[in-house]
Amino acid sequence: MIDNPLPDQVMQEMDRVHAAWKFEELCKDHAFKLAEDNFVYEELIGDFQEWFFLYCIDHSEDKYARSFPDDKDLIDEWWSDEGDLYDDYISPYEDYDPTPEYLYGNSGEPPLSPEERDRIAFQSKTESHGRGNPFNW
């Protein structure tokens, strides 16, 4: 009787498919955690997961990529590669403040929140135009 190698080949192929699926799941879980820890918009996390999975495949020989780094630079790299595709977002981060860095003090914190800065500017404008100012000359 002749042994049929087909069942062994089928099982090996199924093992490879399962290993690839587990690797994809591992990459996407890590990307989700990385994006969530760095406050990436929820709508963008799925796209970052796909990019990170392909990044891990493309850099499979790289020890850095195989170590699944918790590095915000990966999000910045993804954004520099694919950020042009997202017209509705200035940055991938939810807590992005468009205030230029030179307005920050030595503490690294802005002196005023953007909402407070807008409120003060509006108040100043209404006073300079004579509205709401009792001493209108």
Image: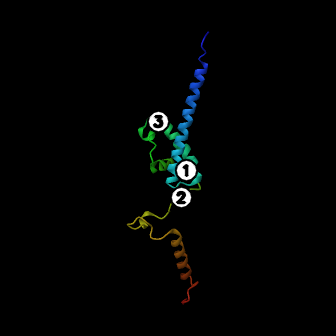
Q: Position of residue 73 (x, y in %)?
A: 45, 49
Q: CA distance from mark 3 to mark 2?
A: 30 Å
Q: Which image quadrant: the N terminus?
A: top right
Q: Is residue 77 above or below residue 116?
A: above
Residue, far front: 1
Nearer-the-camera pick, 39 or 124: 39
Residue type (three-letter) at the residue carrying disc 3: Ser
Q: Which labelled disc corresponds to residue 119?
A: none
3 and 2 marks in contact (CB < 8 Å):
no
Residue drawn where x is 49% and y is 39% of the image: 56
Q: Position of residue 85 (x, y in %)?
A: 57, 49
Nearer-the-camera pick, 25 or 73: 25
* For discs 1 and 3, the disc positioned in front in the rendered view: 3
Dot 1 surroundings within 10 Å: few (below 14), some, or many (20 or more)? Answer: few
In this picture, residue 42 sits left or right of residue 99: right
Residue 132 visible in image: yes
Q: CA distance from mark 1 to mark 3?
A: 26 Å
Q: Which residue is mark 3?
A: 60
Residue drawn where x is 53% and y is 45% of the image: 29
Residue drawn where x is 52% and y is 41% of the image: 26
Residue drawn where x is 44% and y is 45% of the image: 69
Q: Which image quadrant: the C terminus?
A: bottom right
Is tag 1's residue or tag 2's residue first in the polypeptide sequence? 1
Is tag 1's residue or tag 3's residue first in the polypeptide sequence? 3
Q: Which residue is mark 1?
A: 84
Nearer-the-camera pick, 74 or 63: 63
Q: Which residue is mark 2?
A: 94
Residue, far left: 106
Dot 3 surroundings within 10 Å: few (below 14), some, or many (20 or more)? Answer: few
Residue, far top: 1
Q: CA distance from mark 1 to mark 2?
A: 17 Å
